[in-house]
Image (cartoon, grey):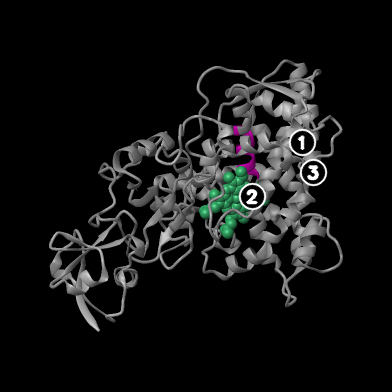
Amino acid sequence: MISSSFYLFGEEPSIARQITFPATYNFADLQVLVASYFSIVDAKDVGFIHRNIELTSASEVYAATGPIAISINGKPVRDIPGPAGLPYVGSFFEIYPDHLGNHQRLFNKYGPLIVTTNMGSRIHHTNDPRLANIFFSESAFFSKKIIPNHPLHAVGMSEAGLFFGNTDSEEWRITHKFLPPALGPKAVRHYAPAMQRTVEESFSVFDKLDLDGESWNVFPYMMKIGSQAVGRLVLGLEFGHFTSVDAPLHEFVTKVTSVVELSKRVTSIGSWYTNMPFGDPKRLRDNMKEVRRILLEASKKASKGIEDLELQDAALQSQNLVDYCLRARDMKGNRLTWDQFVPALVVITAAGFVTSASLLSWMIYGLVTYEGVQERILQELIDHDWDENIQVTADLTNQLKFMNNFVKETQRKHNPSFQPSRTALVDMILPGGYKLAKDSIVIADLHHIHTNPHVWDNADKFDPDRWDTEKIKNRPPGSYQPFASGPRACIGFNFALQEVKIVLSKLLYRYRFSLAETGTVEYDPYYLIIKPSNLYVRAERRFKWPQKTGAKRDA
Ligand code: HEM
């Protein structure tokens, strides 16, 4: 056996630790051993330096006398940089109101991992795909664990399992076993007719707005469509959002929307604010209770089948997710109880419509902002034999190559979700040599990863055709993850993608969209997701369509 002492390059040699290892160890074995002693996340980053000389083989390490420095990617370990901040408010004014622009400025200034302090809450952000993948991987280093500093802590709701539960909780384990099959690709296919019916119901309203020559604010209407689809498919509820131009939003939708708004507002002030017995924190708790009450009542009324079914069969045969939850059994005959599935369905409903409504809004933004996009999608529809009576299926939308590129590029540049957060489980050394303490909150900034100039060519350019290039196939792992990745990634992505393609195609075939107001379209910085707050468009009914080009055959 050999015994050598090691310390982290950048720290004092006097605190070196003695490590014993067999003389048969090669360089890679040494990297792994030392990484495990010093909690270095990726052993491949480990290098050895002795008397200012880099050691490149195991025999050089064996021969070194005295403490050996451990470098990370050839560099010393270091603290995570970030703005110094002001007393009490910390970096609040460095970040808000334009948190997207300001985080970009901070990444430019401090590098790919930064720390900000907001009224006592320290949060780490990255725009680096590799770090994001490490955060998302649910490992001995990181997990989704909702501790007081975590941005989702203010909402509570750990009993939902999905979204708000810790990964090591029984609630998450059980809901994550039962609910994903009902949102898998096969299950989602049988939702296509209901999705189509939902968008077709909106036509009477958009026709009327067109006849009256009126423009409309996109997000609220996409919210009506998105929530109507989710209400129908999750709860079996009819929200009646398109009975007239001004039909009010269903109570459930208004309450969920205010929860989304309030939770961002409360967490943007810091974790200490969460438990205040008044103001926004109290309103947030009250609205959460209301959302749960409404969902419980709706679930009791939802239409149901009779037979119990195995998970996959239940996913294909149930009329809605309440029906699914009541009938689905696992191999051992276990089922979800009402206490388990009602909170989970609250989350699925909310996660389902706010995000999809926002993505649809950004897609309409794309139509009216980026030249030629609208015409190309329309031409593609025509070339795929689209007409007013078409029955849209998943097979059909999957054939729409440009549409699919357009959705991907919209999610790259304008993804609704931007701040999935994880918690550090131990003190550790990250790639780049960053020292991170246990219980630190880390956020993979999806927006900034997707627009990172070190990863993307012409990152700011909206270019759907980039998705056809060789370069895109060889992009770094983790550089595009609109639905996050790893075990806690989105379980509703099949649903979302199918829905937005059906809704947008049907709308675009019927209407020509144009921007109704000049000026900058802004996002709402105090909303939990990124949505355009002032995008006004005109949707004019089409009466003429272009000729087929025969491009379908070539696709
Ligand atoms: C464009 C639309 C959507 C986007 C961009 C999106 C994005 C995301 C992201 C980034 C996460 C990870 C959150 C985190 O790590 O903290 C997530 C989780 C989740 N999403 Fe989505 N989502 C979308 C649509 C949907 C839909 C339609 C549903 C359901 C019908 C859904 C249900 C969920 C659920 C239940 C989770 C939590 C999974 C878990 O806790 O393991 N999402 N979503």
| x 52%, y 65%: residue | 167
Where is the N terminus found, in terms of image quarters?
bottom left
Measured in 3D between alpha carbons, the distance from the residue under mark 2 to the one under mark 3, in whole angstroms, is: 17 Å
Q: Cβ(mark 2) to ligand 1 < 8 Å?
A: yes
Q: Provide residue 162's location: percent of width, then percent of height.
A: 59, 59
Q: Earlier in the sequence, mark 2 or mark 1?
A: 1
- Whether residue 36 is situated above or below residue 436 in the rendered picture: below
Numbered label attached to residue 199: 1
Going by the numbered disc 3, the residue's amino acid type is Thr
Q: Earlier in the sequence, mark 3 or mark 1?
A: 1
Q: Earlier in the sequence, mark 2 or mark 3?
A: 3
3 or 1: mark nearer the eye: 3
Q: Provide residue 230's location: percent of width, then percent of height.
A: 71, 47
Numbered label attached to residue 417: none
Going by the numbered disc 1, the residue's amino acid type is Val
Q: Secondary structure at mark 3?
A: loop
- Whether residue 81 is situated above or below residue 551 in the rendered picture: below
Q: Is residue 137 left or right of residue 346?
A: left
Q: Provide residue 39's location: percent of width, then percent of height.
A: 33, 67
Where is the C terminus found, in terms of image quarters?
top right
Secondary structure mostly seen in magenta is helix
Q: Is residue 209 magenta?
A: no
**Residue on which the image places disc 3:** 393
Measured in 3D between alpha carbons, the distance from the residue under mark 3 to the one under mark 1, in whole angstroms, is: 14 Å
Can the viewer see residue 288 in this picture? no
2 or 3: mark nearer the eye: 3
The one nearer the camera, 499 or 545, is: 545
Numbered label attached to residue 493: 2
Going by the numbered disc 2, the residue's amino acid type is Phe
